[in-house]
Image (cartoon, rainbow, N blue to C red):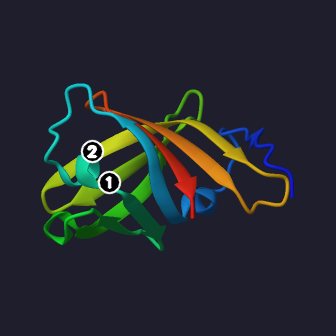
Protein backbone atom coordinates (compact mmCIF):
# COMPACT_ATOMS: atom_id res chain seq x y z
CA UNK A 1 0.00 0.00 0.00
CA UNK A 2 1.16 3.50 -0.79
CA UNK A 3 1.40 6.12 1.97
CA UNK A 4 -0.11 8.68 -0.40
CA UNK A 5 -3.09 10.42 1.21
CA UNK A 6 -5.77 12.08 -0.90
CA UNK A 7 -7.83 15.11 0.13
CA UNK A 8 -11.52 14.32 0.64
CA UNK A 9 -14.22 16.82 -0.35
CA UNK A 10 -15.73 17.81 3.00
CA UNK A 11 -18.99 19.23 1.62
CA UNK A 12 -20.53 15.90 0.57
CA UNK A 13 -18.81 13.67 3.09
CA UNK A 14 -20.90 11.14 5.06
CA UNK A 15 -20.74 11.77 8.81
CA UNK A 16 -19.50 8.23 9.52
CA UNK A 17 -16.13 9.08 7.90
CA UNK A 18 -15.27 10.86 11.17
CA UNK A 19 -16.02 7.84 13.37
CA UNK A 20 -13.24 5.58 14.58
CA UNK A 21 -10.17 5.52 16.77
CA UNK A 22 -7.92 8.54 16.30
CA UNK A 23 -4.47 9.23 17.72
CA UNK A 24 -3.37 12.82 18.29
CA UNK A 25 -0.39 13.35 15.97
CA UNK A 26 0.08 17.05 16.78
CA UNK A 27 -1.61 19.81 18.72
CA UNK A 28 -1.23 23.58 19.08
CA UNK A 29 -3.04 24.87 22.16
CA UNK A 30 -3.20 28.66 21.54
CA UNK A 31 -5.65 29.98 24.16
CA UNK A 32 -7.09 26.58 25.12
CA UNK A 33 -6.82 25.46 28.75
CA UNK A 34 -3.87 23.00 28.79
CA UNK A 35 -5.65 20.98 31.48
CA UNK A 36 -8.87 20.44 29.50
CA UNK A 37 -9.76 16.87 28.48
CA UNK A 38 -9.24 17.52 24.75
CA UNK A 39 -5.93 19.29 25.36
CA UNK A 40 -4.76 16.30 27.42
CA UNK A 41 -6.06 13.60 25.08
CA UNK A 42 -3.63 11.31 23.30
CA UNK A 43 -6.45 9.41 21.58
CA UNK A 44 -10.08 10.00 20.70
CA UNK A 45 -12.63 7.29 20.06
CA UNK A 46 -15.63 8.50 18.05
CA UNK A 47 -18.37 5.92 17.59
CA UNK A 48 -22.18 6.06 17.39
CA UNK A 49 -22.26 9.59 18.82
CA UNK A 50 -20.21 8.39 21.80
CA UNK A 51 -16.89 10.09 22.54
CA UNK A 52 -14.07 8.75 24.69
CA UNK A 53 -10.87 10.65 25.37
CA UNK A 54 -7.79 8.72 26.43
CA UNK A 55 -4.92 10.60 28.04
CA UNK A 56 -1.52 9.48 29.32
CA UNK A 57 -2.88 9.95 32.85
CA UNK A 58 -6.10 7.98 33.37
CA UNK A 59 -7.59 10.75 35.55
CA UNK A 60 -7.91 12.89 32.40
CA UNK A 61 -9.96 10.24 30.52
CA UNK A 62 -13.57 11.25 29.91
CA UNK A 63 -16.64 9.97 28.08
CA UNK A 64 -19.29 12.04 26.40
CA UNK A 65 -20.98 12.64 23.07
CA UNK A 66 -20.00 13.97 19.68
CA UNK A 67 -21.97 14.98 16.63
CA UNK A 68 -21.46 16.47 13.19
CA UNK A 69 -22.90 19.91 12.39
CA UNK A 70 -22.78 21.67 9.04
CA UNK A 71 -23.06 25.37 8.30
CA UNK A 72 -25.97 26.33 6.06
CA UNK A 73 -24.04 28.21 3.40
CA UNK A 74 -20.97 26.10 2.56
CA UNK A 75 -21.92 22.83 4.29
CA UNK A 76 -18.57 22.79 6.10
CA UNK A 77 -18.50 20.08 8.79
CA UNK A 78 -17.98 20.90 12.45
CA UNK A 79 -17.55 18.29 15.17
CA UNK A 80 -19.32 19.12 18.43
CA UNK A 81 -17.78 17.55 21.54
CA UNK A 82 -19.75 17.32 24.78
CA UNK A 83 -17.78 16.11 27.79
CA UNK A 84 -18.57 16.60 31.50
CA UNK A 85 -15.73 19.13 31.87
CA UNK A 86 -15.72 20.62 28.36
CA UNK A 87 -18.12 21.46 25.56
CA UNK A 88 -16.76 22.81 22.30
CA UNK A 89 -16.85 22.47 18.56
CA UNK A 90 -14.16 22.17 15.93
CA UNK A 91 -14.16 22.98 12.24
CA UNK A 92 -12.91 20.10 10.11
CA UNK A 93 -10.29 21.84 7.98
CA UNK A 94 -8.98 18.76 6.18
CA UNK A 95 -9.55 15.06 5.87
CA UNK A 96 -7.11 12.93 3.94
CA UNK A 97 -7.35 9.19 3.26
CA UNK A 98 -5.33 6.57 1.48
CA UNK A 99 -6.93 5.08 -1.62
CA UNK A 100 -7.79 1.87 0.26
CA UNK A 101 -9.15 3.77 3.30
CA UNK A 102 -6.67 2.14 5.69
CA UNK A 103 -4.96 5.40 6.65
CA UNK A 104 -6.60 8.73 7.42
CA UNK A 105 -5.60 12.15 8.74
CA UNK A 106 -8.08 14.59 10.23
CA UNK A 107 -7.31 18.25 10.94
CA UNK A 108 -9.49 20.17 13.40
CA UNK A 109 -9.58 23.85 14.34
CA UNK A 110 -11.36 24.41 17.66
CA UNK A 111 -13.37 27.46 18.74
CA UNK A 112 -10.69 28.09 21.40
CA UNK A 113 -8.00 28.35 18.71
CA UNK A 114 -6.55 24.90 19.45
CA UNK A 115 -5.47 23.00 16.35
CA UNK A 116 -5.27 19.23 16.30
CA UNK A 117 -4.12 16.71 13.72
CA UNK A 118 -5.41 13.19 14.21
CA UNK A 119 -4.36 9.94 12.57
CA UNK A 120 -6.58 6.88 12.39
CA UNK A 121 -5.25 3.96 14.43
* Crowd class of label 2 (few under 14; some 14 to 19; many from 20; radius 10 Å): some
Callout 2–callout 1 Cβ contact below 8 Å: yes
Q: Which mark is residue 99?
A: none
> Is 27 rendered above or below residue 57?
above
- Residue linked to disc 2: 88
- Left or right, 23 with reference to 32: right
Residue 55 relative to residue 43: left or right: left
Which quadrant is the C terminus positioned in?
A: bottom right
Residue nearest the viewer, comparing 13 with 106: 106
User: What is the secondary structure assignment of the residue under circle 1?
Assistant: strand
Q: Which residue is mark 1?
A: 81
Residue at horizontal 61 percent and vertical 47 percent from the top: 105
Q: Residue 3: image x %, image y %?
A: 79, 48
**In the shown orientation, is residue 55 left or right of residue 72?**
left
Query: At 48% from the left edge and 72% from the top edge, which residue is drawn?
Result: 47
- Residue 77, percent across and down? 53, 41
Question: Which of pointers 2 and 1 lies earlier in the amino acid sequence?
Answer: 1
Amino acid sequence: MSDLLLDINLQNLPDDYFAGDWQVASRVLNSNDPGSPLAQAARLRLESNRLETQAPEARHNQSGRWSVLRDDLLKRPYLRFELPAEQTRALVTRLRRSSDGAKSQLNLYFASGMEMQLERV
